[in-house]
Amino acid sequence: MALHIDICIQVYHLASVRMRDLCDRLEVDGELCSQIWTCFEHCLMEHTSLMKDRHLDQIIMCSVYVMAKVGVLKLPELIIDIILSRND
């Protein structure tokens, strides 16, 4: 059981670091970054099958995309910025 908890903590930490990095690169404010985290966390906790055969970054980027799709971010510019930030 302790190993399972350790893995969960490591996944959360890695996701947090990666999401903060992506939000910083995209110049997303703290409140919006928090909303993106909530979307990501919901996927991680309620839809665990999404993690099968996917990289953590894919789920993070999809969470950003969802927030863009609901109108919080400007989508065309955002997609270009995401692609450019991941290539650095």
Image (tube, rainbow, N blue to C red):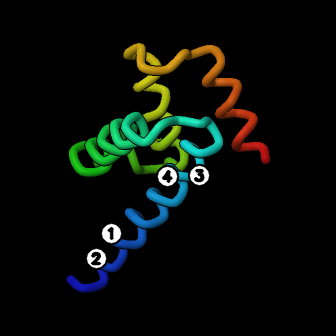
Which class describes the residues within 10 Å of circle 2: few (<14), some (14-19), or many (20+)? few
- Disc 3 marks a residue whose amino acid type is Asp
Alpha carbon distance from label 3 to label 1: 20 Å
Q: What element carries label 1?
A: helix
Q: Earlier in the sequence, mark 4 or mark 1?
A: 1
Q: Earlier in the sequence, mark 3 or mark 2?
A: 2
Which class describes the residues within 10 Å of circle 4: few (<14), some (14-19), or many (20+)? some
- Residue closer to the observer: 74 or 58: 74
Alpha carbon distance from label 1 to label 2: 6 Å
Q: Are marks 3 and 1 in contact (CB under 8 Å)?
A: no
Q: Which residue is drawn at 34% across and 72% down?
A: 9
Q: Which of marks 3 and 1 is nearer the N terminus?
A: 1
Task: Give the x, y percent position of residue 48.
Answer: 29, 49
Q: Which residue is drawn at 63% across and 24% down?
A: 79
Q: How many labels does the image show?
A: 4
Q: In which quarter of the image is residue 69?
A: top left
Q: Disc 3 vs disc 1: which is toward the camera?
A: 3
Residue to which mark 3 is pinned: 21
Q: What element carries label 3?
A: helix
Residue 67 appears in view:
yes
Q: Is mark 4 on a helix, strand or loop?
A: helix
Task: Give the x, y percent position of residue 38.
Answer: 30, 42
Q: Are marks 1 and 2 in contact (CB under 8 Å)?
A: yes
Residue to which mark 2 is pinned: 4
Residue to which mark 4 is pinned: 56
